[in-house]
């Protein structure tokens, strides 16, 4: 099966995709975009979170064929012209990264929150990140990072 | 494995009939897990995501619907996130249940049609559909449309009344005539498969009570004796009209009858005894909350 999909603004075309393959596998193994991480493969951990037509989804639960002709944005697409997105910068500054495995998914989920909700409450942050597991940080630094990014976004 | 991707409902029904070895996939939140873990290797995936009509909902009046009043015709492919955003007023019980589904990522993809297709006893959408008196509309190319009451839809653990050549088109849910509540027990507030769940709906228009039990029997099921008990007690005390306080012990007695209607098992998520107990507590609370809403309903007569 041929998969033609726009990823991070660039059209990608790959052949010989198996019908049961996930979008995550296609991104990582066929398109050379390993930013989205492969962990639970059952939608529990959120480390494969990407935008599909503007909505955050678990790429492991999207059949590759379902992404044909759609717009996908991965963590690799958040930074523009070599500049980290404010959410990424805030994660760096707040020390919200330890092993880093959950970070790409959390960045996409946090990016979506900040784009939708200008001044999120702690409850809204927790709800927005409820589908992303981190086994290192205990989440406090991640919450700090999202608050920091949101406050900068509000001032911008 | 083939990937079938019809763009019209007629083509989807034709593909369903031609390929009995195909598994229908909507949001993928159940089907892809089975594929990723090698639990299933169907001959084909039948992707319903390009059938745009399945992603629409509309309010229909009277005759075309179910239950006499207005009905929401909810396309099988409407994701939970849209139910939360769009249908909180018309279908409060289903919207409450939708908020408890998985995570934001899962709610952006998962659908009620998919939930019904999987027919898990723990499916979050099932209890509120049972409590509201929903009807599932299914269709085949050969025999056309038929409507299956939610009470008759679940036939066993992860089994439903769908024939091999049928697809779920829509769910017809009566617009709420009174308060609805939903409770779910799990180990955290997200990404939880229900240990037990309960939905209740007050139907003041016909002085009836609806219930739905989740994750505490081989299938989602109602608690008919509990429904009749509560509705009867409310009626004999004239409470539907007076909107007075619930008599002492009534909600508790209702909860006990709901628990008695379950037939739970011990499994990794919880014990049968805990499921039964939690159901009695959830039903008591749900009835109390729903009645408090009914008492404060601004629509009530002065």
Image (cartoon, helix red, strand yellow):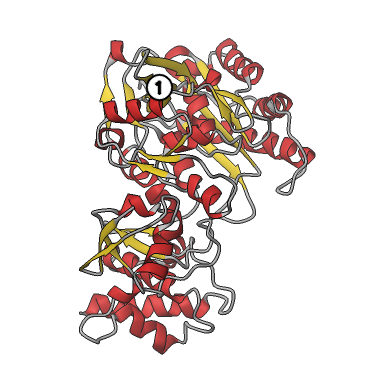
Specify the subunit that label 1 lies on.
B
Task: Find disc 1 in the rendering and name its residue.
Answer: B138
Quadrant for the C terminus of chain B, please. top left
Question: Looking at the picture, does residue B167 appear above or below residue B23?
Answer: above
Number of dots carrying numbers: 1
Q: At which x and y percent is residue B220?
A: 60, 29
B38 left or right of B29? right
Residue furthest to the front: A16
Question: Looking at the picture, does residue A5 appear above or below residue A135?
Answer: above
Question: Which corner quadrant of the image does residue A28 belong to?
Answer: bottom left
B194 left or right of A89? right
What residue is rendered at 42% in x and 66% in y? A125
What residue is rendered at 33% in x and 44% in y? B82
Q: At which x and y percent is residue A128?
A: 42, 62
Quadrant for the N terminus of chain B, please. top left
Question: Looking at the picture, does residue B168 appear above or below residue B229?
Answer: below
Could you say which is closer to the camera, residue B185 or residue B64? B64
Q: At which x and y percent is residue B120?
A: 58, 36
**Res. B187 in view:** yes
């Amino acid at each position: 099966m041929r998969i033609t999909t726009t990823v991070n603004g660039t059209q990608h075309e790959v052949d010989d995709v198996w019908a049961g393959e996930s979008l995550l596998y296609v991104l990582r193994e066929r398109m050379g975009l390993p930013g989205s991480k492969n962990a639970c493969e059952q939608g529990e951990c959120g480390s494969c979170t990407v935008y599909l037509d503007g909505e955050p989804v678990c790429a492991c639960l999207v059949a590759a064929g379902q992404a044909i002709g759609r717009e996908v944005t991965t963590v690799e697409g958040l930074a523009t012209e070599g500049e980290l997105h404010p959410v990424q910068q805030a994660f760096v500054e707040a020390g919200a990264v330890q092993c880093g495995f959950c970070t790409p998914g959390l960045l996409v989920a946090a990016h979506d929150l900040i784009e939708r909700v200008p001044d999120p409450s702690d409850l809204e942050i927790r709800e927005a990140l409820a589908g992303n597991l981190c086994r290192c940080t205990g989440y406090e630094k991640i919450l700090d990072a999202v608050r920091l990014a949101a406050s900068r976004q509000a001032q911008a | 494995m083939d990937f079938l991707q019809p763009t019209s409902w007629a083509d989807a029904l034709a593909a369903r009939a031609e390929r009995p070895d195909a598994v229908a996939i909507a949001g993928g939140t159940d089907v892809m897990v089975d594929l990723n873990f090698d639990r299933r290797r169907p001959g084909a995936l039948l992707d319903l995501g390009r059938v745009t009509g399945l992603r629409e909902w509309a309010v229909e009046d009277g005759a075309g619907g179910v239950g006499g009043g207005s009905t929401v015709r909810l396309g099988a492919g409407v994701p939970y996130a849209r139910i939360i955003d769009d249908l909180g007023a018309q279908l409060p019980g289903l919207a409450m249940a939708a908020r408890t589904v998985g995570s934001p990522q899962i709610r952006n993809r998962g659908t009620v049609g998919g939930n019904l297709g999987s027919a898990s006893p723990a499916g979050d959408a099932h209890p509120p559909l049972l409590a509201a008196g929903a009807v599932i509309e299914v269709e085949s190319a050969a025999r056309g449309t038929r409507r299956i009451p939610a009470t008759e839809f679940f036939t066993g653990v992860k089994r439903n009344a769908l024939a091999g050549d049928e697809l779920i088109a829509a769910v017809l849910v009566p617009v709420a005539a009174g308060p609805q509540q939903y409770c779910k027990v799990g180990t955290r507030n997200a990404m939880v498969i229900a240990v037990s769940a309960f939905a209740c709906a007050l139907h003041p228009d016909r002085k009836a009570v609806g219930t739905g039990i989740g994750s505490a029997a081989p299938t989602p099921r109602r608690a008919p004796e509990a429904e009749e008990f509560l509705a009867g007690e409310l009626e004999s005390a004239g409470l539907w009209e007076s909107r007075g306080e619930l008599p002492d012990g009534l909600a508790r007695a209702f909860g006990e009858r709901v628990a008695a209607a379950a037939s739970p098992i011990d499994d990794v998520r919880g014990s049968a005894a805990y499921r039964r107990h939690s159901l009695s507590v959830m039903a008591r609370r749900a009835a109390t909350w729903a009645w408090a809403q009914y008492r404060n309903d601004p629509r009530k007569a002065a």
